[in-house]
């Protein structure tokens, strides 16, 4: 993904930029509304992260100008202003989502990914009920999983884990990301439940389990 980050506070911008870059995404940074408009006019982005409190042109006006240019790039507004009125105003002028500061970084990543999926038709695409990888098939409607046409039985957590891998093929998923996505933010970060369930899933999906590669001290990637 190519992302434009519009944030005037250098330390906040650096924190966000480094975190997003660690996901393998390309990040351009604009420190003002004017810079943001210039970047957006000369580059193509998958998502724009737009702070509202900017020097010069405010974030709301940047959003209005982008939409006036017929830009369809998803915009996620980031702001310390968290009143319902602010949220409603932001959505009315063309923002696609709204995340108040301070925010949980995993939530930011999840929202960016959701905007990207939505913009690229994944609500009806990856959301096209059937996901396949090799001989493995996952039916998102019936929750049936099959290998070469033969259905296999998975527990709910195993299905959730498999779906996470199938919707992130080729991407490195840290144990922390997997733990948060499948077991929730309150899960014990020191637990080995992720490794245990990955082992179970590999065994249950047979030869296709070789697609789940272990990256030592990092996490897992499905090839």
Image (cartoon, rainbow, N blue to C red):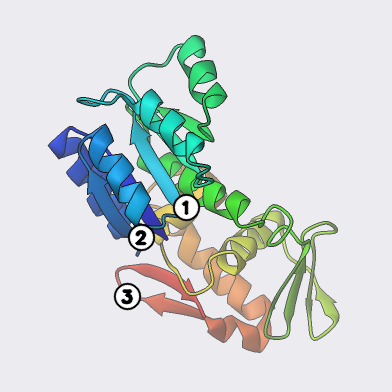
Marks 1 and 2, how far apart at CA? 16 Å
Per the rendering, the mark at residue 179 is: 1
**Left or right placement of residue 6 versus residue 154 in this view:** left
Is 55 located above or below residue 70 in the figure? above
Disc number lying in front (2 or 3): 2
Spatial separation of the CA atoms under disc 2 and disc 3: 17 Å
Q: Nearer the viewer, residue 119 or 177?
A: 119
Residue 186, can we see it? no
- In the rendered image, the residue lying farthest to the bottom is 207
Mark earlier in primary sequence (3, 1): 1
| Above or below: residue 84 compared with residue 55 | above
Quadrant of the frame with the N terminus: bottom left
Disc 1 is placed on an element classified as helix
Residue at 77% over, 59% down: 140
Quarter location, residue 64:
top left
- Residue 23 numbered tag: 2
Choose the circle earlier in sequence order: 2 or 3.
2
Label 3 neighbour load within 10 Å: few <14, some 14-19, many 20+: few
Lower position in the chain sequence, tag 1 or tag 2: 2
What residue is disc 3 on?
216
Name the element at disc 2: loop
* Residues under numbered marks 1 and 2 in contact, where contact means CB atoms less than 8 Å apart: no
Camera-side residue of 159 and 104: 104
- In the picture shown, does residue 107 fall above or below 23? above
Residue at the (44%, 40%) spot, across then down? 107
State the SS at label 3.
loop
Distance from the alpha carbon under mark 3 to that under mark 1: 17 Å
Residue reaching furthest left? 10
Image spot of residue 37 (x, y percent): 32, 41
Image coords of residue 152 (percent x, y): 79, 74
């Amino acid at each position: 993904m190519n992302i434009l980050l519009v944030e005037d506070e250098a330390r906040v911008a650096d924190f966000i930029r480094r975190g997003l870059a660690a996901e393998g995404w390309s990040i351009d940074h604009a420190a003002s509304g004017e810079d943001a408009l210039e970047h957006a006019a000369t580059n193509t982005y998958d998502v724009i992260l737009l702070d509202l409190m900017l020097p010069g042109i405010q974030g709301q006006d940047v959003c209005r100008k982008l939409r006036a240019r017929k830009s369809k790039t998803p915009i996620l507004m980031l702001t310390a202003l968290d009143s319902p009125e602010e949220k409603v105003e932001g959505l009315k002028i063309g923002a696609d989502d709204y995340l108040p500061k301070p925010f949980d970084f995993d939530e930011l990543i999840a929202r960016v990914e959701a905007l990207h999926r939505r913009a690229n038709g994944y609500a009806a695409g990856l959301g096209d009920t059937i996901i396949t990888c090799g001989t493995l098939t996952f039916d998102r409607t019936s929750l049936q999983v099959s290998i070469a046409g033969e259905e296999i039985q998975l527990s709910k957590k195993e299905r959730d884990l498999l779906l996470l891998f199938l919707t992130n093929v080729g991407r490195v998923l840290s144990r922390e990301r997997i733990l948060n996505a499948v077991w929730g933010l309150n899960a014990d970060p020191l637990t080995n439940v992720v490794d245990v369930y990955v082992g179970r899933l590999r065994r249950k999906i047979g030869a296709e389990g070789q697609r789940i590669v272990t990256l030592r001290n990092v996490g897992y990637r499905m090839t």
